[in-house]
Amino acid sequence: MTQLAKLTPIAELIHRALGAEQFAQSASLFLRLRPADRADVFEILDDEDQTQLLRHLDIPTTADLFDELEDQETAEAAEFISLERLGDVLDEMDPDEAADLLGDLSPEKAELALTEMDEPEDVLPLLSYSDETAGGRMTTAYLCLHPQTTTAEAIEYLRAADPDIDVPYYLFVADESEHLVGVLGLRELVIADPHTTIDSVMDQDAIYVPAVADQEEAARMMTHYDLSVLPVLDEHKHLVGVITHDDILDVIEDEATEDIYRLASVADTDLEPESAVREQLKGRLPWLLLNTVTALFAAWIISIFEDLFVQVAVLAFFQSVVAGQGGSAASQNVAMIVRAIALGKIEPKRVWAILLRQLWVGLLQGIIIGVIIGLGVGIWQGNPYLGMVLGLALIGNMLVAGIVGTLLPLAFQSIGQDPAMTSSVLVTAATDALGFLIFLSLAKMFLPLIIRYLPY
């Protein structure tokens, strides 16, 4: 049973309690759940139930709920509460989540909500960064010390720190100008002599990310260096925030979703099976229309060899084999190249070496598959030359797949576009069109020999 199926009965109980105006009971049922489960149950409820439930939750619980909901759901839920209450909720939320919510509201409503907040200074710096950057993913809730603070003073500071701060296991050290000068782990702090100053036990080689860097770069750094938290610096090297492990998990999920959708030629990465029909058409139809154009181009290439099909109709049975194998091989290449690009594993100087290796792999795959299929078709049809043409065409299209599947993602990256966008439509168009061209050109070349073995 899925987690959603387990929570549906609870959502039904809350729905009934709200319908019977048993608001205290509905809130009690909701509060028994873990925060993440509350978000799932809240999404199951209809708009009317959500509105009623929010009216009977306290500010901290509402803030926790908004922290757990997806950005779009949070923005929709915010429409159910007054501006005054929204300001209180924003004060209670994690700064980064509050900034995301404000960014999803209309500019007018976001400005009014800021005026209702008691502590907008924690959120305002985050609003200047795009959601897709390290600055857009960071939080301003972190612990920072002065280099000359003693470890005993640091421990007292830690004890008195805001319990809502999520990163007490890392202490950051900044000078008077707010420049990051080091980082200190909780273990090093506890075992150090109480009179030792922080600058003598901290790690001065702190790893950081620029605030304007792409969120993927931050994710790569945290994964590569096995970090639980990553400091973020502005253009003046001032410490402006930190990215925590839970935020980077969201980034990894978002980027994986984006790549999967791009590989499937879906433009809108927020689409769900239950998304509105209009939204699904907007996110999916343009690429299908482009696919129609490329399919017509492939059909045009086939039409050039119309007389060939009149003479050897059996060719029509096997042309899809060549195109299909080439498309599959190219998709394999695209998947590997896109993943390598996402992980920062491809250097410009290695591009040609990678291309040559993929050509070698494509040649070997083409020879193996071409020999197997060529011999099989030759024996099946009693026409060795037909089998030979099919085998050679498979080798040729496997080489095309190696070139297209390797160079197209790299070309898109070089012009600042998502490499995953090269996937289905463009790769399939290339392998289909060139596969047909190679197969039919070879068939025309060997036509007299093929005809010799035809039964008619």
Image (cartoon, rainbow, N blue to C red):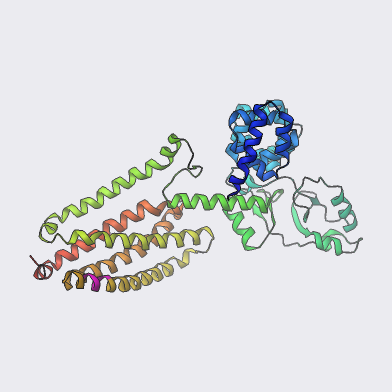
Across and down, in percent, residue 271 comes to 49, 42
**Among the 4 quarters of the image, the one containing residue 225:** bottom right
Q: Main secondary structure of the magenta part?
A: helix
Q: Please tell me how many numbered marks the rendered image carries.
A: 0
In the picture, which quadrant includes the C terminus?
bottom left
Q: Is residue 213 visible?
A: no
Residue in front for this viewpoint, 50 or 437? 50
Residue in front for this viewpoint, 154 or 455? 455
Q: Is residue 375 magenta?
A: yes
Across and down, in percent, residue 401 comes to 34, 63
Residue drawn where x is 17% and y is 65% of the image? 443
Residues shaded magenta:
373-377
Q: Is residue 436 visible?
A: yes
Across and down, in percent, residue 319 comes to 23, 60
Query: Left or right: where does residue 300 sit relative to residue 283?
Result: left
Residue drawn where x is 13% and y is 61% of the image? 312
Query: Left or right: where does residue 370 sit relative to residue 268?
Result: left
Residue drawn where x is 59% and y is 43% of the image? 131
**Among the 4 quarters of the image, the one containing residue 360:** bottom left
